[in-house]
Amino acid sequence: MRFDVVTVLPELLSGFLDHSIIKRAVERQLLEINIVNLRDYSTSKHKQVDDYQYGGGAGMVMMIEPLANCIRDLQSKSKFDDIIYLTPDGKTYDQKEANKMSLQKNLMIICGHYKGIDQRARDMFVTKEISIGDFVLSGGEIAAAVVIDSIGRLIPGVINDETSALTDSFQDGLLAPPVYTRPSDFEGNVVPEILLSGNEAAILNWRNEKAYERTKNFRPDLLME
């Protein structure tokens, strides 16, 4: 799977890409991540990519011309399943969307900055708009890292134990149950006896019950979907 990430601050993504699961996935050629500096597509002497907004108001807007030049150049090299713009007013991103997008092959992600991008870029090129939550970030790079990680870990082979991703929170519409590891007794706080029993069917039932109980207590909205 390939991601092309358009950004004005490529260095913000370097730390994320140079560590952990995503780095190993890239090294094993399970993921390909191409970071694209939008300033390379500016025709301005000073590589300007933002300007004041028409109609007045605070904040700068990412210009249409560099974005159009960049997107068209990338499209000339690859066919994209979706061109994604990360924006607070997009559709709220969730595990179901991550699962669906993990089946695609090529995704372009546009990281917004300032007051966002010129609306014409959204109208002309963007096929999917995503928000990772009801809050505002300084730029889309952190959101891009969230999307890449959540999708990337679903690609077969990225996680050594592929069943692990399938039992994460939200995969079955529930939060994950409590988990424990050694020692079984820590300062009088003991692991539930059922988990030490070796009875796989009973353990599965316990986990299902605890997942439902935790969801009911902390995220009852998930049970209403």
Image (spheres, grey):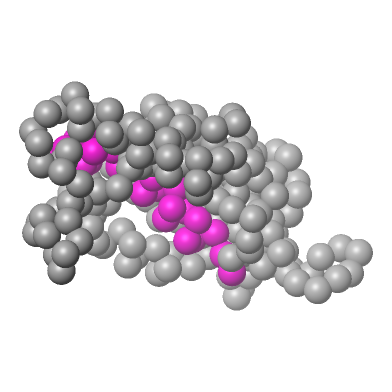
Task: Residue 57 in the image: state x and y as whole percent.
Answer: 86, 71
**Above or below, 25 relative to 88:** above
Q: Please state which of residues 158 and 64 is positioned toward the viewer in this rendering.
A: 158
In this view, the residue farthest toward the top is: 201
Quadrant hosting residue 195: top left
**Above or below, 176 relative to 111:** above
Task: Residue 102 in the image: state x and y as whole percent.
Answer: 39, 33
Q: Name the residue at 43% across, 40% down.
A: 213
Q: Name the residue at 11% across, 59% down.
A: 185
The boundaries of the magenta stretch are 138-166
Q: Name the residue at 53% across, 65% down.
A: 8
Q: Please state which of residues 143 and 222 is positioned toward the viewer in this rendering.
A: 222
In this view, the residue farthest toward the right is: 55
Taking 188 as reference, is 6 left or right?
A: right
**Above or below, 172 relative to 184:** above
Q: Please state, as top left, top right, bottom left or bottom right, where the C terminus lies in the image.
A: top right
**Above or below, 122 relative to 6:** above
Query: Is residue 36 in view?
Result: yes
Q: Name the residue at 9% across, 36% down.
A: 197
Task: Residue 44 in the image: state x and y as whole percent.
Answer: 64, 68
Magenta includes 224?
A: no
Task: Residue 179 in the image: state x and y as whole percent.
Answer: 24, 48
Quadrant hosting residue 1: top left
Magenta includes 156?
A: yes
Query: Is residue 1 in view?
Result: no
Taking 217 as reference, is 69 left or right?
A: right
